[in-house]
Image (tube, rainbow, N blue to C red):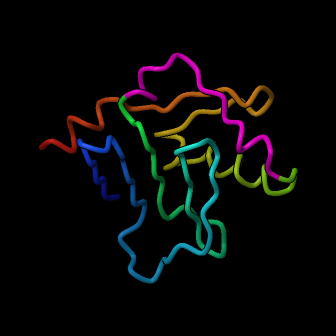
Amino acid sequence: MQLLYDEEGDVLDIFFTDDEQALAYAGYEVRQGIVVYVTKNFSPVQLTVVSFRRLTQAPAIYFSALKKQPARLRNKLMRLIASSPVSSFLRIDANTFYGRVMNPAVLDICAV
């Protein structure tokens, strides 16, 4: 796993694999500024979070773009988000589509 944080833009990119062959096939916006990239087999490749600091401080975030996805795709995305390693960064309630961006300590890791 590799973390890249742009402090000026407040953008966190998490790359879940070091495998050069695991290229992103598609990206799905689950909320404005939060995109999950997956392989053809729907394995997570990358997670991009814009406004990371602000979102980690919010008590709850509505994942409206996720809710608007077609049911079949939405269910696949929810399974992906609920499993490791994505679940370390996002927590979303499947019934309400409210959730949180996790791990504000990630910025400490990136600073090292």
Q: Which quadrant, please, contains the N terminus?
A: bottom left
Image: 100 above or below 4: above
Which residue, as the protein is rendered here, is positioned at the far right?
Answer: 71
Q: Residue at x 39, y 36 (%)?
A: 52
Q: Residue at x 70, y 52 (%)?
A: 77
x and y, in percent, of residue 36 in the image: 56, 55
Q: Residue at x 55, y 62 (%)?
A: 37
Which residue, as the protein is rendered here, is positioned at the far bottom?
Answer: 21
Quick check: 95 left or right of 110? right
Q: Which quadrant, please, contains the C terminus?
A: top left
The magenta stretch is: 54-69
Quick check: 34 left or right of 14? right
Magenta highlight on residue 58 = yes
x and y, in percent, of residue 42 in the image: 65, 66
x and y, in percent, of residue 92 in the image: 65, 33
x and y, in percent, of residue 18 in the image: 35, 70
Which residue, as the protein is rendered here, is positioned at the far top?
Answer: 59
Quick check: 95 left or right of 91? right
Which residue, as the protein is rendered here, is positioned at the far front?
Answer: 8
Image: 24 above or below 76: below
Magenta highlight on residue 76 = no
